[in-house]
Amino acid sequence: MKIQDFIKNTFGYTPKEIYQFTLPTDSKNPESTTIQNSKKQPKKPQKITTNINTNLDYVKTKYNTLINSDIIIREFTLNARGNQYKAFLLYIDGMVDSQLLNDFVLESLMLRNRNNLFNGNQNRIISETVSNNVTIRKVKKFNLADYIESCLIPQNSIEQQSAFDDIFDGVNSGNCGLFVDTLSVAFDIDVKGFKQRGISKPENEIVIKGSHEAFVENIRTNTSLLRRLTHTEDLVIENLQIGKITKTNCAVCYIKDITNDDLIAETKYRLNNLGVDSLLSAGELEQLLTDTNVLGVPKILVSERPDNAVKTLLQGRVVVIVNGSPYALILPAVLIDFLSSPEDTNLKTIFANFLKVIRIISAFFALLLPGLYIAITSFHREIIPTELLYSILSSRQSVPFPIILEILTMEISFEIIREAGLRVPSPIGPTLGIVGALVLGQAAVSAGIVSPISIIIVAITGISSFAIPDFTFSFHLRYFRFAFILLGFLAGFLGIGIGIFIYLSALCNLETFGVSYTTPYAPVINSKNNGFLLPPIWKREYRATYLASKREKKQNKISMKWRY
């Protein structure tokens, strides 16, 4: 077996069922995409009948009302057309606003309607046109369903549904379902009122200059934050559901006059072709949308800041929001995006670029510093100044372990302290990290288990990993650090050099939604506003070329007209 096949079979994802994907002829219409597999076609949805008792029995069976105590079925009588009709409401206790349900649904149906009986002979004028002095009117008979929707329920969102599944989806999301005798449709009424967390400060993407608002777990609150910051009707927010059981609501957000149509089509194609039973978080969706790779580098940027999401929308990217998750997925994301901070655009250019260089150095230390230390002390001692070499050797005289075991012990101990600091309650976490590192480090040196220089190397490496803005990319560097430690111990600079070559070659071979992961440096794109370092704000005239936006230019050549 070839090494390439072994790596692909080991780290790649091979589903048990082979799906044959047929791409749509029109890439702009991802809904036309079909999937052919060996599974049977799903059953047709159960239709609502005109018999209220049949509908009631079906609802009780589906929701197991004899067991579920939070499923409420409120039966009552509706007066209309001079007749009385049996009806019932279906909702989940704790997910609806009781006052809203009582005042604008039940009261309207049970009390107010008594003084306004509906005459079945009333008609409704749909359109009226005048041709050759002759008035032509199109009239539709005003039936009971239209009367209930238009006259009885003063609610901002109400829809008629003919299938039980559509009503159940709304009820499971916090709506209520209204069933009326003799009607083959039911009403999905928006009366959501469950508790949710208010907008608070970001916990992970902390900035000094910038907005202090963060996404929450409610999808509509998150999309409203995007609307409020963009102030444009060109912002498109498309809703879809993922998960056969959970039916999690997701929102695909983009600016139609800026974002490339192929990127939108590819995103919607992947979302529409996820065959999973459940989707509970944005982290799960991130893994489902990206291709597997041996390196494990992130290909989608995760942000909890609405202002950062809006900045990427204006660049021509797509933002995906998952209900129940306080994060937004931004795609595509290339390597330089994971070394950039949301605060960079709020700082003066010289300061922002200085911090970007610091992050590059931090990434270098986080990935290679322990391996370089082992390589130098084991194979290349001649490059160390004599006095420093004597100091290192004297500090290691009392250490009984080889250098690699010493470094690995400290690295694993540091990771344990870091993980423990994240899992314990927040008031204790920072204290545990500081005290644990100091006490264990001092005790290890005093006991002769490790040398002081090893403590310094591991500490610099750990602190450098904290300087990486993106947690997932920082974790990737921490993960591959151990590979370079092993290469440095086995072959010195030669091993590390070979490792860097393979690592960079693998990075250059990656793509994210059709964009090279190492762009604009591999391949080289000689265009404005593509590099890692930021130009002055008055020279940021163009959007990134690799995004292929519809509107490449984003500001005038002379943006500061007051100077001229």
Image (cartoon, helix red, strand yellow):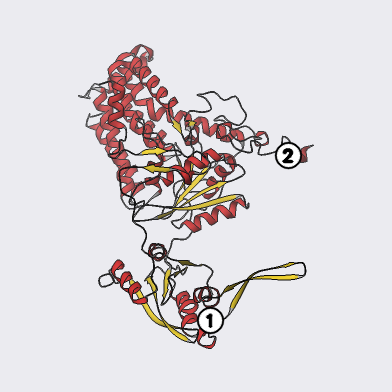
> Residue 495 appears at what percent x and percent y?
33, 17
**Which residue is disc 1 drawn over?**
120
**Labels 1 and 2: the sequence-earlier one:** 1
Residue at 72% from the left image edge and 38% from the top image edge: 559
| Residue 214 makes an appearance in the image | no
Residue nearer the viewer, 121 or 193 = 121
Residue at 56% from the left image edge and 75% from the top image edge: 141
Q: In front of the other: label 1 or label 2?
A: 1
- Give the label on residue 188, or none: none
Secondary structure found at label 1: loop
Residue at 47% from the left image edge and 61% from the top image edge: 198
Task: Determine whether, in the image, residue 15 is placed left or right of residue 556.
Answer: left
Quadrant of res 33: top left
> Residue 140 appears at what percent x and percent y?
58, 72
Q: Amino acid at mark 1?
A: Gly
Above or below 392: residue 215: below
